Amino acid sequence: MRQVLVLVKLRIVLMSAASAAAGLVAAGSRDWTGLIALFLAVSILAAGSAALNQYQERISDATDVRTRRRPLPSGKMHPATALTIAMLLLAAGSLSLLVAGGSMPAALGLSAVVLYNGVYTPLKQHTSLAVLPGALAGAIPPAIGWAASGRSLEHPAIAALVGFILLWQVPHSWLLHMSHNDTGSLRIPVPEPRRRSVLAVWLLAALAALAVFPLAGTVPLTPLAVGSLALVTAPGLASLWFVVLRPRPVLCFRLTNVVALGAILLVLGTGLSGGVMHGLH
């Protein structure tokens, strides 16, 4: 079971499922049963996609210091076992998402799998532009949650949330790569002298998307929500400072993760607490 949890990249799975739940809550849903069902369905589908990714990259993972201890390159799991687990999880996740959310969330979930496993994974061996379909795949989960509510995806509230996740994915990926001394199959399309300035632009864009949450309706326009948003933004500003003035990729990577997790928890917290207060009233 320990190897299976490593195979499915549990932390990434939980992040994807939490962002899908945030999308549902941002749409105004206060149905705990539906929220839990969606969380589990997205978790299963994301786990299958992650397992398939490790099967696809088992050969290149063996040559990378960061990934060579994974179940497949280390020999702790047979490739056929990993592929079977991946296929079962993908099938179960797709069906669960169809039941929990409907046809549109299921279609969005499958499109994320296609982008991640069918486009990003093979493409990153050949071009640095692979980070773009990878970022798009990572930004789809909030839209899955929003679509599960039955609301239109054209609303600015979900656009802001998806936009933030999309913009955050690029510096997140680059900083992870830089934290391991540029090893691995991912390529950064910017030469070293200009890398910090380009990273700063991406981080600023992500923080700008985060700042419009109250105006877009992603979180309520209240003093508490705005104050919490400022706290969430603070690690991002610190990361930006380190990127520009004192390059420390590992620290910046962790700070950007704190921002993303904080943003998701802020949407969940303000939405669910508002529902509780409305019920009590």
Image (tube, rainbow, N blue to C red):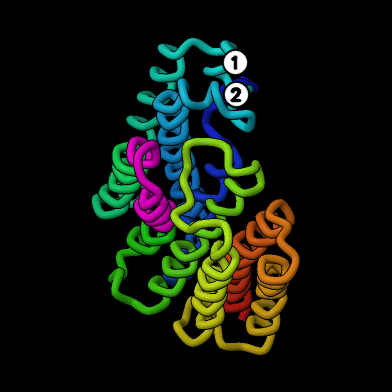
Task: Using the rendered image of the protein, determine whether residue 141 is visible from the camera's viewpoint.
Answer: no
Residue 259: x, y in percent? 64, 65
Does residue 245 lie above or below 261 as drawn?
Answer: below
Cα–Cα gap, marks 2 and 1:
6 Å
**Main secondary structure along the magenta-highlighted residues:** helix
Could you say which disc has been placed on residue 74 in the image? 1
Q: Nearer the viewer, residue 60 or 29?
A: 60
Three-letter amino acid code of the residue under disc 1: Ser
Q: Nearer the viewer, residue 91 or 100?
A: 91
Q: Is residue 189 magenta?
A: no
Task: Using the rendered image of the protein, determine whether residue 51 is visible from the camera's viewpoint.
Answer: yes
Q: Nearer the viewer, residue 233 or 60?
A: 60
Could you tell me which secondary element the residue under label 2 belongs to?
loop
Q: Nearer the viewer, residue 194 or 235?
A: 194
Residue that sits furthest to the front in the current view: 193
Three-letter amino acid code of the residue under disc 2: Arg
User: Going by the image, does 49 lie left or right of 62?
Assistant: left
Could you say which disc has been placed on residue 68 in the image? 2
Residue 274, by quadrant, is: bottom right
Q: Residue at x 55, y 44 (%)?
A: 12
Does residue 216 lie above or below 20 as drawn?
Answer: below
Marks 1 and 2: in contact by CB < 8 Å? yes
- Give the residues in magenta: 121-141
Residue 158: x, y in percent? 40, 71
Q: Residue at x 71, y 61 (%)?
A: 247
Q: Residue at x 52, y 31 (%)?
A: 8
Mark 2 or mark 1: which comes first in sequence?
Answer: 2
